[in-house]
């Protein structure tokens, strides 16, 4: 999957609109999908992107001290 097939801006907007709880749940789901053999092989690129973007949104909301 390349970035042209994956609507990154739409994902970012969706994450931005989530509550903290929803964002944490989304991140946990993405982490599970990135676990070894979760999808029968290496993690799919879209799940890695979702995980990284959810981490970035959390850092945006709560920057490190």
Image: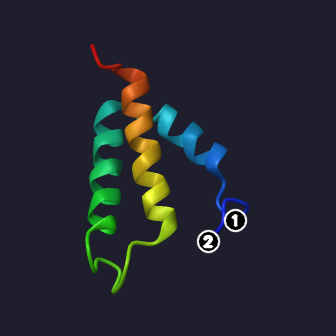
- Colour mapping: rainbow
Give the vertical position of 1 relative to 40 (above or below). above
Query: Marks 1 and 2: CB-CB under 8 Å?
Result: yes
| Viewer-nearest residue: 41 or 5 | 41
SS of the residue at dot 1?
A: loop
Q: At 50% across and 33% down in the image, what residue appears?
A: 17
Residue occupying the far bottom of the picture: 40
Cα distance between the residues tagged 1 and 2: 6 Å
Viewport quadrant of the C terminus: top left
SS of the residue at dot 2?
A: loop
Q: At 51% across and 64% down in the image, what residue appears?
A: 46
Where residue 44 is drawn, which disc sits there?
none
Residue marked by disc 1: 5
Q: At 29% across and 42% down in the image, what residue appears?
A: 24
Relative placement, left or right, of 44 versus 37 is right
Give the vertical position of 57 relative to 24 (above or below). above
Residue marked by disc 2: 1
Give the vertical position of 31 relative to 52 (above or below). below
Q: At 43% across and 59% down in the image, what residue appears?
A: 48
Relative placement, left or right, of 51 versus 17 is left
Viewport quadrant of the N terminus: bottom right
Where is residue 7, by image quadrant? bottom right
Give the vertical position of 11 relative to 35 (above or below). above
Residue occupying the far top of the picture: 65
Tell me if mark 1 has few (under 14), some (14-19) or many (20+) residues whose alpha carbon lies within 10 angstroms of its own. Answer: few
Tell me if mark 2 has few (under 14), some (14-19) or many (20+) residues whose alpha carbon lies within 10 angstroms of its own. Answer: few
């Amino acid at each position: 999957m390349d970035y042209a097939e994956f609507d990154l801006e739409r994902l970012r907007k969706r994450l931005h609109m989530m509550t903290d709880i929803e964002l944490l749940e989304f991140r946990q789901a993405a982490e599970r999908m990135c676990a070894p053999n979760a999808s029968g092989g290496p993690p799919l690129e879209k799940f890695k992107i979702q995980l990284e973007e959810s981490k970035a949104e959390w850092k945006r909301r709560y920057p490190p001290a």
